[in-house]
Amino acid sequence: MSSYIGWLRDRIGPDPIQLNFAAVCIRDGNRVLLQRRGDNDAWGFPGGSIELWESAEEAAIREAAEETGLAIKVDGLLGVYSKYQHVYPSGDIAQPITIFFCGVPIGGQLRGDGVETLDLRYFTLDEMPPLFNQQHRDALNDLAAGRRGVYR
């Protein structure tokens, strides 16, 4: 949990809040990189919370590096996904507002940390595993359909 979210949760507890995230659909040819997450042992796109004073693009690039070991270049906006609810394993409730970018690797070496990232794997669009929440499933559907600039 980021320091800002921890600070906020210390004051509010598990009650519903809005949280801002950035995620990135990293493509390598016809394959898309997914992360098996440490918090729920399920697959999703790399991403995380936008820290105070950080842009969404900066957060997506930082989170990709932290969670995958890859340096990426953002090459477009997939969409903004905002009408969702998520209940975390801790019982915290949030309306996650996630800005999904498209990106490509430009350096680094693929690696997970074994804590936040249990596994990393490229999948073709026709062999995707189930994703951990509806927000990520909707982003995947939009990516597969070739849509950009989506807002939900």
Image (cartoon, rainbow, N blue to C red):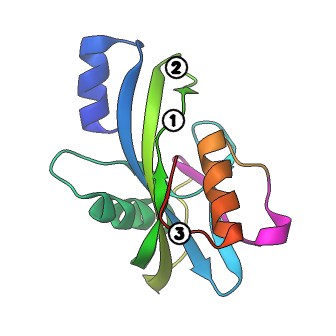
Question: Count of labels shown?
Answer: 3
Which amino acid, by three-letter code, is at mark 3? Arg
- Magenta stretch holds residue 125: yes
Q: Which quadrant of the figure has residue 106?
A: bottom left
Which amino acid, by three-letter code, is at mark 2? Ser
Q: Residue at x 45, y 29 (%)?
A: 95
Residue, disc 1: 83
Magenta stretch bounds:
115-129
Q: Crowding near pointer 3: few (<14 within 10 Å), some, many (20+)?
A: some
How much space separates mark 1 and mark 3, taking CA atoms?
A: 18 Å
**Image-based side of 30 in relation to 104, left or right:** right
Which amino acid, by three-letter code, is at mark 1? Lys
Please indicate, yes or no, whether residue 116 appears anywhere in the rendered image. Answer: yes
Image marks 2 and 1: residues in contact by CB distance under 8 Å: no
Name the N-terminal-most of marks 2 and 1: 1
How much space separates mark 3 and mark 2, taking CA atoms?
A: 33 Å
Residue 112, numbered circle = none
How much space separates mark 2 and mark 1, taking CA atoms?
A: 21 Å
- Label 3 SS: loop
Q: Residue at x 66, y 87 (%)?
A: 29
**Image-based side of 137 in relation to 76, left or right:** right
Foreground pick, 65 / 15:
15
- Magenta stretch holds residue 122: yes
Residue, disc 3: 148
Image marks 3 and 2: residues in contact by CB distance under 8 Å: no
Q: Position of residue 1 (x, y in %)?
A: 38, 36
- Label 2 SS: loop
Name the N-terminal-most of marks 3 and 2: 2
Residue 90, numbered circle = 2
Q: Crowding near pointer 2: few (<14 within 10 Å), some, many (20+)?
A: few
